Image: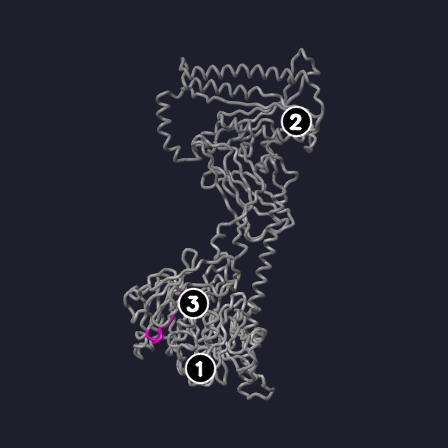
Amino acid sequence: MEGRCAVETWADFGFSGTPRTSKVRFGFGSELFLCHGSDEVYVFSRPTRERKLKAVLQFAGPVSDLVESHDGQLLYVSCRAGVYCVRLQLLLSRSPADESSGPAELHISSECLVVAEVGVLSLLLVGSVLLTLSNRDSAWVLTLYSAPKQASSSICEVLSSFSLPLLSGVAHNDTEGKTGETRRPVLICVRSGDTAPPHSSSTTTTTTSDISLTDGCLCLDPLLFKLLFGIDSALAKSPVVLCGLPDGCLCFLPLRLPGSRLRVLHSLEQPVVYVGVSVVEETGPSRHHHAQGLVAVGELGRVVLMKTDKGAPEGEGNVACFVERCVPGPVMCGCMDKSSFYYSTGSDLLVLDLSDGSSRRGGQEGHGETSSKADAALLHSPTSLNVCRVVALAEPTRHNSAGSQLLGLSDRGQLQMITVPVWREDATLSKLPSIQVGRSVKDLLSAIGDVCERASMLKTAIKCKNQTLRHLNQVLNISFLLKTGSNTEGHPPIQEKTIRCHATASWSRLLQKDSLNLTCVLDNSSPYVLERGWTLRLSVFPLSSSPDAGGESSSTQFSFPFHSLHPGERLEVSLPLAAAGSASFPRTVSCSLVFSLPSLLGEEAASRPALQSSCISLPLNTLTVDWLHALQLNSPTATLVNKSTCQWDSVTADPIQAFLSSPQIRCREGAGGESAPKPEREQYSACVRVSSELLRDTLVLKSSGLDPLGPPHSVCLSLVEWLFSEGLGGVKSGHHGDKLALSNPVVQARGPNGHTVKLTAKEVTVGEESLGKEECLSTVELQVESSSIAAVCGLHHAVLRRVQTLLQRAPERAAATKRLQSLGLRQALQRAEHLLQQIQQSRISGAFGVGVSTGQMTRSLLSCYLELRKNPLLII
């Protein structure tokens, strides 16, 4: 091949085209029709002097195929609703003033609908017969209609219909299969070369268009026609329709043969992209142009050449020869120019020579060597033309001394004229004219620019993929790290997770309203970086539902996305936990890390709606905030004057409420007198008894400045300090500045519900005189008192939780007070039996209504509950 390809851009439409939906087709006049899968068809004028967009036809749905009538007056367009017929004379009747204003935009109405068939994929016009091919109910349906004589006529009449089952398991191009678009089937018509004279041609060279008849059929060698489609079709001089289907089948249908049906000629086992004729030669004294071969090309690069194998003279023993080979793919589009097949892979435009070499050498060989020549025709390697991004090709328009000219459409919507130089074996290394040298350099630089642009895009894509894979690797490592540290089958983890949360509960005041806030810290002690896409999610819900909530446990979720958290760094967030007056404690805070999968793909995630809500949730740990965390400690000085200032605090806390309630106070004072005594609220209490020896072994020896042999109150102080400083459940209370309040075994505080609570730690001796001093045991009794039973229950539960952790780290040794333990168990059993009798009596009396009201039964059950709290078991 002499020289290089010259690429000239005719127009830039700006749309994005794909090989499955784009199509470029020459009209019989000077018009050029383009479609790219949208609802628009572009009519482009291609005279030599002025090339411009003439009109834009807008249809009701995406356009799948188009074909022009033989006289150039009508245009048939298939879309979602069916087939439309448009009269092209309307496009040519515009005045020069209208043309200067820009292309006409014509909306094609439903009046032009001539075939009401849904899902038409391909069209073919053979004489006065319009053929449509569609896919319905897992079958290919080929329907024949009578073509209308003019536009906006009545609906076309159905002549006949044929169907073929759809095959499965066909190999596809994975790159294009992701779009979900259906490839357009290929429809062509061929007839025997001895049935009608070919289209007149005055040029000495021929192309594929030279063997096209006025009825839209391609002229095939009579002998090959008879061998492929049968002697009946040859004798009936019937045109044959060839269908190249996306399931790999190459089918044919004789149109004028009675009783004909759609039959399979060959299977490529991959979607058929192109079907055409090749090796055009002049035969006979009339110099008619007949195609000597039939070509079918698959999407993955399989090429099938069908020729006549003349095994003996005078046609004896002639058979059809099928020769197959594979070329580099994928094949997106293609066209045939005499014996050269041009096809595009998206990244390059290549040409495959299908000639057997006899025409170039000028010699004639024997008939017995036809099969070997057909094999040799497919042994040529494709030649690169260094033109990329072509997604649609039209048939060559001219083949002269300057070379073949192809019209292509790029994936960016550029209409390009590609001039391919002539193949010359006797080309020498003679010096080229300066104009051709400049053009060759320009083409070479353009090709280099295209290659550099593609290389840059591929480099960027590879870099993005590598970053995505590295990010995904980090996510998998973190997921494995957190999963291996999780609880298995109810057993606690062996060691703490390297990524975990801890928190501090503290009270704050804003706009004269107190609220309990939780400051949560995410600590990354792992060797991995928490990059973009991670979110810290905290779910807060009460351990038990309150009666006001109707028995339902309501939870609140807080999400805190962050960009990156390197090893050793911490993320600190704050969230409101409860307002003043709330009694729904303890509260559980479930911590988890959530990773959003769309953050891995970036902009590609927008094209995948299924991934928009996809995420990975990894649990970290659970925090518990109880009543001890929520207490507000009072200093000893504030405790002394608490009674004289409590009324003033209540007035200053809410002056409006105090003002509204002042008339009620005066009315009560006037009615009852100033000396009327105020009823004192009932106090509730619960206590916990812990062995002093246990506290000395676990608390006193670990406290700085305290002597285990010192005064007895040191054990009580150690217990009080430990209760308020222990970070149980990963949560610490914000009492760091209240050392003065914790310097006394009696602690005054205010609960989250606003009630005053009192915690008293004192050392008592448990045992009986008959047992002797050796059987007596020194214990520390912690008593909780408050006028709120909710506060007493909540604090009692919080103290017991902390004592449980104390017992887990206590040293193991044999107990020396067996009689004391048995005595304590005996007394507890006697109290339990007595309380059980009271509870049963209250339930029986309440069920039968025997002299017991609801209030009396409630008080009886409450007294039983308080009795259980006042006489606890001894924890040793």
- Which image quadrant for residue 692? top right
Asked if residue 482 lies left or right of residue 684, the reply is: right
Dot 1, how many residues are within 10 Å of its Cα: few (below 14), some (14-19), or many (20+)? many
**Amino acid type of the residue that numbered disc 1 sits on in the rendered structure:** His
Magenta span covers which residues?
Answer: 64-73
Number of the front mark, 2 or 1 = 1
User: What secondary structure predominates along the stretch shown in magenta?
Assistant: loop
Q: Position of residue 589 (x, y in %)?
A: 53, 39
Residue 36 is tagged as 3
Going 46% across and 58% down the picture, which residue do you hit? 166
Name the residue carrying label 2: 715
**Do the CB atoms of the residues marked 2 and 3 lie less than 8 Å apart?**
no
The answer to whether 562 is drawn above or below residue 794 in the figure is below
The stretch drawn in magenta includes residue 70:
yes
Residue 288 is tagged as 1
Does any portion of residue 39 appear in the rendered image?
Answer: no
User: What colour scheme does the image use?
Assistant: one colour
Query: In this view of the protein, which residue sits in the foreground, 73 or 280?
Result: 280
Q: Position of residue 240 (x, y in %)?
A: 42, 69
